[in-house]
Amino acid sequence: MAHLWIHDDSGWNASRLISPLFDLGSLRALTETNAAIDDYQPACATSAGFARLVQVDAAGVGTWALVASPSFPVRLNGRMPAAGLRVLADRDEIRVGGSARYFFSTETLAAVEPFPGAERAVFCGRCRQQIGTGAPAVRCPGCGVWYDESQETPCWSYSPNCAFCETRTALDSGFKWTPEE
Ligand SMILES: [Zn+2]
Ligand SMILES: [Zn+2]
């Protein structure tokens, strides 16, 4: 899942982009209250214009675009977004006004979540048993393979690395990339 690095008094903090629409014009207020982006309610465009991050892929693969009105003081990697719309790439820098800085990132952290189920049976990448809908599981952020991950069947964390790619399985390993101070 894509996330946005937001710079505030404590440095850089990553927030997951869950809502399919995110209004940069309200980001400053958001970071001051330390609210989660999950809770964010998009504000209406103001006369000063707007800048928004919009998820353009309904499948939720993490394709996002920056959409801005011509009058809004937003810069993507130092430039105004051409024609008011740019598809975002990993590590794109976004500036709003004179000081607010953000980085878009497509990096995803491994996390235990209830297995959402699938049309076909899905088998654990380690033990090869079928994973039941709702069972605690981890989807490898590197290759997308699902693993069991519970006290009884810690298949994801069993080995230091994913069985199919180099992704480390420590659940607290943090982001590989963070913006420089
Ligand atoms: Zn397993
Ligand atoms: Zn993997």
Image (cartoon, helix red, strand yellow):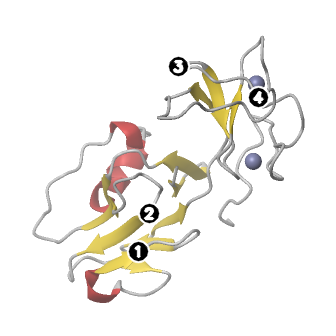
Q: Earlier in the sequence, mark 2 or mark 3?
A: 2
Q: Secondary structure at mark 3?
A: loop
Give the number of the mark in front: 2 or 3: 3
Side (left or right) of 40 relative to 89? left
What amino acid is at disc 4?
Arg
Side (left or right) of 51 relative to 110? left
Q: Residue at x 78, y 42 (%)?
A: 173
What amino acid is at disc 1?
Val
Q: Residue at x 78, y 11 (%)?
A: 152
Mark 1 vs mark 3, CA separation in Å: 34 Å
* Residue 146 drawn at (x, y percent): 66, 36
Q: Which residue is disc 1 drawn over?
A: 87
Nearest to the observer: residue 139 or residue 126: 126
Q: Which residue is disc 2 drawn over?
A: 63
Q: Secondary structure at mark 1?
A: strand
Mark 1 crowdedness (10 Å alpha carbons): few <14, some 14-19, many ≥20: some
Mark 4 vs mark 3, CA separation in Å: 17 Å
Image marks 1 and 2: residues in contact by CB distance under 8 Å: yes
Q: Earlier in the sequence, mark 4 or mark 2?
A: 2
* Mark 2 CB lies closer than 8 A to ligand 2: no
Image marks 2 and 3: residues in contact by CB distance under 8 Å: no
Q: Which residue is disc 3 drawn over?
A: 134
Side (left or right) of 129 relative to 106? right
Nearest to the observer: residue 58 or residue 105: 58
* Residue 18 drawn at (x, y percent): 41, 44
